Image (cartoon, helix red, strand yellow):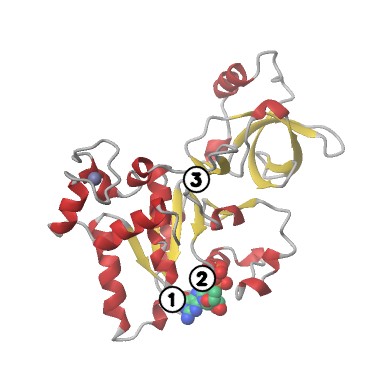
Amino acid sequence: MSKRYLTDQQKTRIAKQQSKHSDIDEQTKTGLVVARYGKHIDIEDIEQKLHRCYLRQNLGQVAVGDNVLWKPAENNASVVVAIEPRRTSLVRYNKFEGDKLIAANVDQLIIVVAPEPIRSINILDRYLMLAELQHITPIIIFNKIDLLDEATQPVFQNILNYYKTLNYLIINSSTTTHEGLNFLADRLIGKNSIVVGLSGVGKSALVKYFLPEHNIQVGDLSEKSGEGSHTTTRANLYHLPMGGNIIDCPGIRELSFGDLTPQQVVQGFKELRKFAADCQFRDCSHTHEPGCAVLKAIEAGSIDPNRLASFRSIIEQKD
Ligand code: GDP
Ligand code: ZN
């Protein structure tokens, strides 16, 4: 993305923010973090050349998608000296150690669900909540539509239609028939997207379709080399041929929201949060309280009860 080419003015601003005694000089270059390992990162420079870099201790968290300033050095000793302010930060919540940055500057959360495994649809609300709380635009991909027949098609459409009423974009797709994939490709142009969803929904098949040269393995999780040979990589950013980037990040696959309060969780549910503003108690958990506007809305049929069930399962930390 053109965003990674900083102007001199931007460099100066970042330098002022992050470095009291100037680390920034004419040696300093701009770069984009494209891979994150334990102790080092890979940075791509303006010519798309890769450089292994170490991180200064005082930098704070650095993730794939970050635009950085770095200083080249021999023998893989290049070092990152500053991080450009982020548009968005995708984090995993952790009350004790602090939130963990998974990826930076993510524009779109591509949430993949499928008729098989069906549990993927049960956890859709969790990913939507993550997108809402972190101000990242979600796109719902209903994949494997080639598996639907006359009996099952209306059942799934009925479930997903509710999400359309919430103004979420839903794309029906199949990596087998390629239906919907051109439409999705258009939405990926010029954006940083991250593909999430339960194992087996077809994430790797989708990414492989858009990045055929990247040798991405499709199939049973236990058989995937991704779980074995790449375990040292925390995340990667790949350029799409049509412009835009896909971030692949195993860390986002385990989601835990146990550390969030009900008041935070409710902000991740578009229609619940609208009604929650009118609850009698400010710390209403929307489970039993008198004067609960959410429960009233459920009774009136304005909210899908499944959404309240999802909300409750998150605050009760059930699966
Ligand atoms: P991931 O775990 O989410 O990355 O899922 P994979 O991409 O590995 O796909 C899991 C299984 O579903 C594989 O056997 C794929 O061949 C299959 N699959 C993926 N997309 C589709 C699809 O659109 N239709 C059908 N019928 N199978 C698919
Ligand atoms: Zn309430």
197 vs 21: above or below:
below
Q: Gap between marks 2 and 3, in whole Å?
A: 21 Å
User: Which numbered dot is residue 44?
Assistant: none
Label 2, secondary structure: give it.
loop
Q: Which residue type carries mark 2?
A: Gly
Are dots 2 and 1 in contact, CB under 8 Å? yes
Q: Within 8 Å of ligand 1, the CB of disc 1?
A: yes
Q: Gap between marks 1 and 3, in whole Å?
A: 25 Å
Q: Earlier in the sequence, mark 2 or mark 3?
A: 3
Q: Within 8 Å of ligand 1, the CB of disc 2?
A: yes
Horizontal side of residue 276 vs 105, given as left or right: left
- In depth, the one of 38 and 297 nearer the eye is 297
Q: Earlier in the sequence, mark 1 or mark 3?
A: 3
Residue found at the very far top of the displayed protein: 21
Q: Quadrant of residue 31?
A: top right
* Residue 316 locus on image (x, y percent): 41, 53
Image point (69%, 41%), residue name: 43
The image quadrant where one finds the N terminus is top right
Q: Gap between marks 2 and 1, in whole Å?
A: 8 Å
Q: Which residue is mark 1?
A: 144
Q: Quadrant of residue 211?
A: bottom right
Label 1, secondary structure: give it.
loop
Q: Which residue is mark 3?
A: 106
* Residue 217 locus on image (x, y percent): 64, 70
Q: Which residue type carries mark 3?
A: Val
Q: Within 8 Å of ligand 1, the CB of disc 3?
A: no
Q: Earlier in the sequence, mark 2 or mark 1?
A: 1
